[in-house]
């Protein structure tokens, strides 16, 4: 069953949550949308926060900023379903952790009355808008919306303000082996690297080769097209580097003109194959319109 979108509360993003500057109150029962100051010990991390990786160096930098400038943006919370004297963080857990490192004993919060579905939506919206999630965390958040709350991919794309193809391609990363997903989470591989490995039986071996050889995404795509690692075809990435200057110039000119990766493979003589690479159906439709002379 599809769940109807609640755009009136969530579709406008974080700005709609904060509203006008409210008054600061002493502890008492929460009022919807109220800003107040509470003790850091009365907050707990969100159960639905898609962000799982809080890096020490990032927290240290944010803590130093808070020491100098204070906590500028309030943390969004809801009453803790398990303890009416406490609050559960909906958005801003990293700020809460950094504030504690900075020695703050109280923080500003905005209290919202939200159900679990709304909490997950807002947590994903905030983190995606801030680009705070790695690709695996983002994919896991989308999966939670789909599996826990019966959202379609189209509904997820509307909520987060991304294309349907972006949601689909991000979800595909969860098909990678756990070890490869971990490399994306710790920053050893980018999402672009990982997307090229989806569906490969030798994804783990390819991932290690990417790291060892410091391959960029284009080189990985060429390596993947060449065949399973360890076969004669794996020299494909090196062949790209050995192309003559004219071929590389043609590739660059066409790539710049289309905004998509163009690869030219020349056979003996003057023949060869030109490949235009696309990452989703929107880009494929764009290629179709460019080749047929159609306008959007």
Image: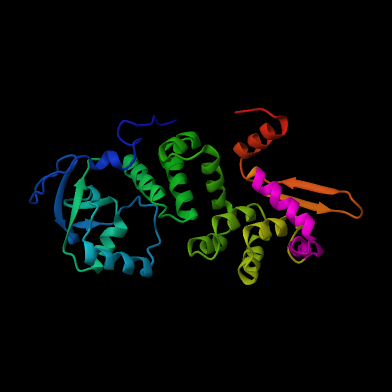
**Relative to 94, is 17 above or below?**
above
Coordinates of residue 119 in the picture (x, y in percent)? 32, 44
Find the residue positioned furthest to the bottom: 212
| Camera sees residue 115 | no
Left or right for 145, reference 175: left
Find the residue positioned furthest to the right: 269
Coordinates of residue 250 in the picture (x, y in percent)? 75, 51
**Relative to 249, is 294 above or below?**
above
**Relative to 184, is 276 above or below?**
above
- Say which of 146 and 68 sits in front: 68
Q: Quadrant of the N terminus?
A: top left
The tally of labels here is 0
Q: Residue at x 36, y 66 (%)?
A: 58
Q: In which quarter of the image is residue 176?
A: bottom right
Left or right for 161, reference 38: right
Coordinates of residue 77 in the picture (x, y in percent)? 24, 49
Q: Residue at x 34, y 40 (%)?
A: 13
Write down the region rendered in magenta.
Answer: 231-257
Q: How is the image coloured?
A: rainbow
- Say which of 148 and 280 sits in front: 280
- 252 in the magenta segment: yes
- 47 in the magenta segment: no
Task: Name the magenta segment's main secondary structure.
Answer: helix
Left or right for 140, reference 118: right
Coordinates of residue 67 in the picture (x, y in percent)? 22, 67
Q: Quadrant of the C terminus?
A: top right
| Camera sees residue 230 | yes
Q: Quadrant of residue 112?
A: top left
């Amino acid at each position: 069953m599809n769940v109807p979108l609640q755009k009136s509360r969530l579709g406008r993003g974080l700005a709609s949550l904060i509203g006008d500057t409210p008054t600061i109150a002493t502890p008492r029962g929460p009022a919807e949308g109220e800003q107040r100051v509470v003790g850091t010990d009365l907050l707990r991390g969100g159960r639905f926060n898609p962000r799982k990786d809080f890096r020490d160096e990032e927290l240290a930098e944010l803590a130093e900023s808070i020491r100098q400038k204070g906590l500028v943006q309030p943390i969004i919370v809801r009453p803790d379903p398990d303890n009416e004297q406490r609050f559960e963080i909906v958005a801003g857990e990293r700020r809460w952790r950094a504030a504690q490192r900075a020695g703050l004993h109280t923080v500003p919060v905005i209290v919202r009355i939200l159900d679990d579905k709304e909490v997950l939506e807002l947590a994903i919206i905030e983190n995606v808008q801030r680009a705070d999630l790695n690709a695996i965390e983002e994919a896991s958040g989308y999966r939670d919306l789909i599996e826990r709350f019966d959202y379609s991919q189209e509904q997820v794309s509307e909520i987060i303000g991304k294309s349907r193809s972006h949601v689909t391609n991000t979800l595909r990363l969860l098909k990678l082996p756990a070890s490869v997903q971990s490399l994306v989470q710790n920053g050893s591989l980018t999402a672009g690297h990982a997307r090229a490995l989806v569906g490969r039986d030798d994804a783990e071996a390819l991932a290690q080769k990417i790291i060892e050889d410091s391959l960029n995404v284009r080189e990985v795509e060429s390596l993947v097209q060449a065949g399973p690692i360890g076969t004669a075809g794996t020299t494909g990435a090196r062949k790209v580097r050995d192309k003559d200057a004219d071929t590389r110039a043609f590739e660059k000119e066409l790539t710049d003109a289309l905004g998509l990766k163009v690869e030219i493979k020349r056979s003996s003589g003057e023949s060869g194959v030109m490949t235009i690479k696309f990452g989703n159906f929107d880009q494929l439709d764009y290629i179709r319109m460019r080749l047929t002379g159609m306008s959007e």
